[in-house]
Image: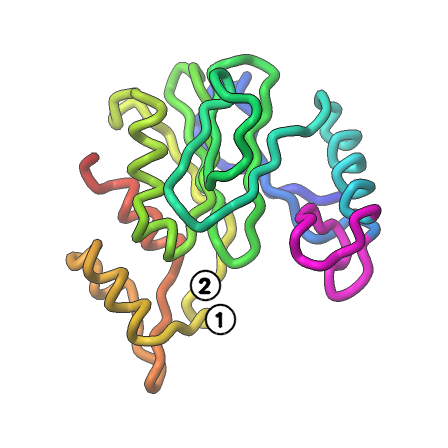
Amino acid sequence: MDFIVPGWRAPRHVRALTTTRRGGVSSAPYGSLNLADHVGDEKSSVKTNRRLLQSNLGCPALSGWLQQQHGAIVIDRDRDTHSTFGDGSLTRRAGTICAVLTADCAPLFLTDRGGRFVAVLHVGWRGLVAGIIESGLAAVATSPKQVLAWIGPAISGLAYEVGSEVRERLLEVFPEHRTKISPSGARWQPTCRAWSSSACAAPV
């Protein structure tokens, strides 16, 4: 099982990672480490994959999986252990795991210089427009100057084409970032990680 680990300056007691598709039991086209139970994969395979992940990490039971909506809801796991509809979660409690599922979209990890909280957000173009990053920064209630962020893997411009309607939605919210979406014939190629980085740098 392979992991991608952020090269950020988070305190040592903060652990963050992104899985890859290697190391699970799912068959094609879900092969092999599919952790999503809403995409048509066998439920038993997803459950096995989640158990394998838990075993590899040596962590408590993985719970709190979200039913993601491409929206701006961030759940505080310390106060709400039952809600599942959202696109981000946070905790200030040691040993609590926050997780999101991503394919094309980017996972955005947040903590602060003291490691007093961790949060993870599911960031795609719909979430950017809806304000998921602003919601996440508001939820952690920490000075933006103290926040550390890492943007995980996401689809890149060359592999990602959208129509003019998506371009216009993005530019309505981020008009200053017109150069972060490139023309490709009648289509456009945004880069999720670049837009996420821009949103992190914007005032909230």
The residue shown at (45%, 69%) is 160
Q: Nearer the viewer, residue 148 or 161?
A: 161
> Does the residue at mark 1 contact the one at mark 2 (Cβ under 8 Å)?
yes
Q: Amino acid at mark 1?
A: Ala
Specify the segment rendered in magenta.
Answer: 26-44
Front residue of this view, candidates 174 and 159: 174
Q: Is residue 31 magenta?
A: yes
- Is 75 part of what is drawn in magenta? no
Which label belongs to residue 159? 1
Answer above or below: position of 139 versus 130. Answer: above
Q: Which sits in the foreground, 200 or 87?
A: 87
Q: Give the camera-side residue of 121 and 64.
A: 64
Q: Which residue appears at 25% of the width and 41% of the height?
A: 201
**Residue 14 numbered tag:** none
User: Which secondary structure is most common in the magenta stretch?
Assistant: loop
Q: Which residue is label 2 attached to?
A: 156
Residue at x 29%, y 38% (from the top left corner)? 134
Looking at the image, residue 101 sits to the left or right of residue 179; the answer is right
Looking at the image, residue 8 sits to the left or right of residue 128; the answer is: right
Label 2 neighbourhood size at 10 Å, few (<14), some (14-19), many (20+)?
A: some
Residue located at (34% from left, 86% from top): 185
Please provide percent x and percent y for residue 70: 44, 50
Quadrant in which residue 180 is drawn? bottom left
Secondary structure beneath label 1:
helix
- Under mark 2, the amino acid is Ser
